[in-house]
Image (cartoon, helix red, strand yellow):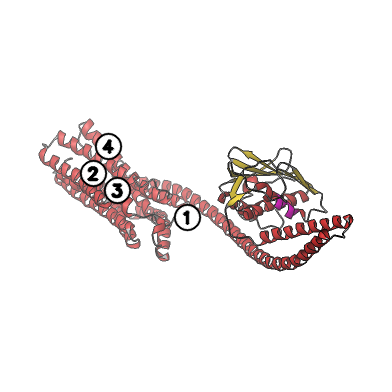
């Protein structure tokens, strides 16, 4: 099984790094060779750590990617400090000085790890974190740099004192690492399933590093430590632990959507504690400045240095806090705009529901009316047939009876199409003729164009290939586009709508070109609730529904404004080549121009 192979691979990694390091420490003689081996081996282990953590930074979730990239950044700072250490010992062949110039890099490597605590990679992707989280991370970074400058640097440069330097660095570094361990343990207690295991492993790796640092520090004080010794095994173990945790996370951490949501209380705490920490960090600056001035008991040079560092940090903090507040205001305005837009959309949906109820009632009314109309139409057709078949009927009477029968049949056909449009049947994909469907849509729309200065021209291509789809759905699409064009041309007092069918390669093309005012934002016309019609006249859902129908038919629909004025809707549907649907005798033949006005 996959997990068994992964566990064996992880065990092999542990044995390779720790076993190999232990064997080399026991077999190589103390001196330059062992030091060089220890330095190079630690650099290689840190490269493995970075690779293991970055394996998880390629997911679709930006929050998860950022979490693992921050952990890898902390490991990268470790590697940078170790490379500097290796350069001094291996390349320059010099002992590590105290204080070491690269100590600040080792100290700052924990800051990205602390920043990763503020992210929740297990949260659903839909949950959006405000941009202030990045500013909070910068504020925490500045605060830790300030603490290093305030507590450690004075004994390194202002008033050099190795003992105080070591004490200040060790205490501050320990406090930083213990805070990291506590953060990982807290997050492990608030999460579940795979992420709890990951946080427990991360806390274990951090604890291993802290204990190993204490052991190495004690060995340095006794003068028995050297690079490559067995004292480094704990350090190597912590690096390997971080890397294998990243490898393990690919298997044990499910996607955010697969996790059950944590409690609202825990989610709120996870979101709120970073800004609270930054607030506490900002408030600590004047407290430390007052302590330095009145109670520190240090020399004037150190007090001045600490006060200048505090003032400079206050300037940086004030700038970042101002930036954070500006981002908060922008996010509030955005959220307010989104909420207002949501309310407007809800009102539109409510109006659409009301309109749907009206249409449903109208459909029932049309069904009843059609039944009542069909009965007299049947009688009219019967009587006209009697007149036509009568032996004593004159030629003039036969002509009149023929006209009555033709008009009655036409009326009955229109009633049937109206019923089919108002009460759509379930979708059924069959081989259909686009030309005949367009003719039906134009006949339905022609009913109210008698007294308007609007003309519709239908130009169809002969022998147009068939299309597989639902005739009723496409009828609604064509009717909707035609109605929108008619409404647009009414705004300018009339015009001409030209409907063309053609073939373009493997597709059947239908174009609706009008001479209206055009469309202000053609790229938005298919968005739900987008409408330019007056309030109460349009819902903004018609073209969105048309787009969905065409996509379901594996076609494409586009809208653009013409250079000579007006708008054009272009629909492409995949053709069924070598197959031509049968046409009724009463349908409009293809290849002619039909004008409706």
Q: CA distance from mark 1 to mark 3?
A: 27 Å
Circle on res. 83: 4
Q: CA distance from mark 4 to mark 2?
A: 23 Å
| Mark sitting earlier along the chain (4/1) | 4
Circle on res. 162: 2
Residues under numbered marks 4 and 3 in contact, where contact means CB atoms less than 8 Å apart? no
| Residue 302 showing in the rendered view | no
> Residue at the location (26% across, 46% down)?
165
Q: CA distance from mark 4 to mark 1?
A: 38 Å
Q: In the image, is 560 to the left or to the right of 241? A: right
The location of residue 472, given as percent across then percent down, is 63, 55
| Mark sitting earlier along the chain (3/2) | 2
Q: Is residue 440 magenta?
A: yes
Q: Which residue is mark 1?
A: 128
Q: CA distance from mark 2 to mark 1?
A: 48 Å
- Element type at mark 1: loop
Which circle, 4 or 2, is nearer the viewer? 4
């Amino acid at each position: 099984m996959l997990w068994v192979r992964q566990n064996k691979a992880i065990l092999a990694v542990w044995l390779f790094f720790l076993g190999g390091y232990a064997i080399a420490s026991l077999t190589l003689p103390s001196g330059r060779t062992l030091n060089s081996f220890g330095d190079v081996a630690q650099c290689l282990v840190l490269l493995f750590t970075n690779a293991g953590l970055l394996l998880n930074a390629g997911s679709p979730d930006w929050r998860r990617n950022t979490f693992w990239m921050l952990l890898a950044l902390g490991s990268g700072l470790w590697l940078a400090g170790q490379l500097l250490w290796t350069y001094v010992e291996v390349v320059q062949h010099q002992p590590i000085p105290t204080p070491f110039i690269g100590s600040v890099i080792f100290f700052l490597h924990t800051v990205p790890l602390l920043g990763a605590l503020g992210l929740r990679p297990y949260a659903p992707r839909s949950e959006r974190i405000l941009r202030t989280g990045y500013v909070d991370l910068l504020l925490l970074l500045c605060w830790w740099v300030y603490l290093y400058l305030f507590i450690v640097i004075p004994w390194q440069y202002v008033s050099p004192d190795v003992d105080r330097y070591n004490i200040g660095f060790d205490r501050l570094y320990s406090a930083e690492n213990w805070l990291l361990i506590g953060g990982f343990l807290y997050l492990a207690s608030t999460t579940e399933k795979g992420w709890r295991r990951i946080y427990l492993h991360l806390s274990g790796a951090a604890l291993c590093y802290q204990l190993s640092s204490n052991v190495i520090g004690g060995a340095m004080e006794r003068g028995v430590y050297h690079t490559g010794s067995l004292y480094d095994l704990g350090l190597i173990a912590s690096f390997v632990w971080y890397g294998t945790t990243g490898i393990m996370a690919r298997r044990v951490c499910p996607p955010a959507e697969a996790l059950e949501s944590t409690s609202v209380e825990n989610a709120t705490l996870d979101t709120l504690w970073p800004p609270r920490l930054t607030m506490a960090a900002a408030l600590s600056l004047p407290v430390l400045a007052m302590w330095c001035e009145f109670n520190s008991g240090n020399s004037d040079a150190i007090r001045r240095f600490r006060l200048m560092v505090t003032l400079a940090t206050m300037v940086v903090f004030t700038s970042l806090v101002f930036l954070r507040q500006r981002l908060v205001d922008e996010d509030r305005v955005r959220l307010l705009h989104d909420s207002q837009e949501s309310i407007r959309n809800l009102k539109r949906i409510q109006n659409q529901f009301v309109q749907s109820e009206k249409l449903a009632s109208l459909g029932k009314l049309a069904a009843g009316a059609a039944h009542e109309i069909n009965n007299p139409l049947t009688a009219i057709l019967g009587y006209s047939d009697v007149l036509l078949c009568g032996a004593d009927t004159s030629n003039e009477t036969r002509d009149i009876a023929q006209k009555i029968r033709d008009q009655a049949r036409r009326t009955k056909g229109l009633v049937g199409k109206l019923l089919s449009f108002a009460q759509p049947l379930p979708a059924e994909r069959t081989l259909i003729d686009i030309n005949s469907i367009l003719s039906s849509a134009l006949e339905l729309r022609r009913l109210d164009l008698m007294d308007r200065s609007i003309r519709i021209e239908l130009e169809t291509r002969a022998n147009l290939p068939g299309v597989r789809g639902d005739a009723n759905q496409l009828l609604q699409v064509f009717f909707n586009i035609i109605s929108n064009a008619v409404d647009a041309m009414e705004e300018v007092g009339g015009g001409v709508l030209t409907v063309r069918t053609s073939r373009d390669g493997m597709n059947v093309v239908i174009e609706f070109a009008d001479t209206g005012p055009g469309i202000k934002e053609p790229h938005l016309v298919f968005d739900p609730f987008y409408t330019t019609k007056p309030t109460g006249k349009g819902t903004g859902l018609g073209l969105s529904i048309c787009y969905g129908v065409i996509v379901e038919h594996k076609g494409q629909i586009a809208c653009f404004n013409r250079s000579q004025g007006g708008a054009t809707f272009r629909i492409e549907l995949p053709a069924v080549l070598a197959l031509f649907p049968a046409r009724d005798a009463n349908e409009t033949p293809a290849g002619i121009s039909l004008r409706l006005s």
